[in-house]
């Protein structure tokens, strides 16, 4: 007889688990919050293959890697600072400081 039971948690619990992990919770904590065992959460994570975790800055005053690349591309193309911030979606002050 195989060990372990069938995955009886509803799909909504699994989706919520991944939302919590994306928000920064550890897998065990996310599993506890949705009422699943740690091993169940681990299994879900392994079966998913991989996750894209969004690049978040520590504070709004810091630029992400994508922001820095957009600014560098704009400077290389000799765009005005106003055009660069419009394309990158960042503050003019941040571009002027660079």
Image (tube, rainbow, N blue to C red):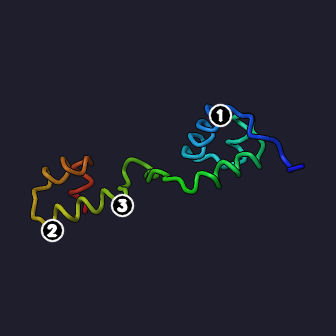
Callout 1–callout 2 Cβ contact below 8 Å: no
Nearest-to-viewer mark from 3 and 1? 1
Which mark is first along the chain, 2 or 1? Answer: 1
Query: What is the crowding at mark 3: few (fewer than 14 residues within 10 Å), some, or many (at least 20)?
Result: few
Which residue: 66% across, 48% down? 44
Spot occupied by residue 76 in the image (x, y as percentages of width and height): 15, 68
Depth order, front residue of 98/22: 22
Relative side of 87 to 27, left or right: left
Secondary element at image label 2: helix
Relative side of 13 to 55, left or right: right
Q: CA distance from mark 3 to mark 1?
A: 33 Å
Identify the residue under disc 2: 76
Secondary element at image label 3: helix
Relative side of 77 to 2, left or right: left
Of the numbered discs in the image, which one, if any, rests on residue 65?
3
Identify the residue under disc 1: 13
Spot occupied by residue 71 in the image (x, y as percentages of width and height): 23, 60
Spot occupied by residue 95 in the image (x, y as percentages of width and height): 23, 56
Depth order, front residue of 24/6: 6
Which mark is first along the chain, 2 or 3? Answer: 3
Q: CA distance from mark 3 to mark 2?
A: 16 Å
Q: CA distance from mark 1 to mark 2?
A: 47 Å
């Amino acid at each position: 007889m195989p060990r372990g039971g069938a995955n009886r948690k509803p799909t909504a619990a699994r989706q919520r688990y991944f939302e919590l992990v994306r928000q920064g919770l550890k897998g065990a904590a996310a599993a506890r919050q949705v009422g699943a065992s740690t091993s169940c959460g681990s299994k879900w994570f392994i079966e998913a293959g991989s996750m894209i975790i969004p690049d978040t800055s520590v504070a709004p005053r810091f630029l992400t890697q994508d922001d820095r690349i957009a600014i560098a591309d704009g400077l290389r193309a000799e765009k005005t600072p106003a055009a660069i911030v419009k394309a990158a979606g960042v503050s003019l002050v941040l571009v002027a400081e660079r």
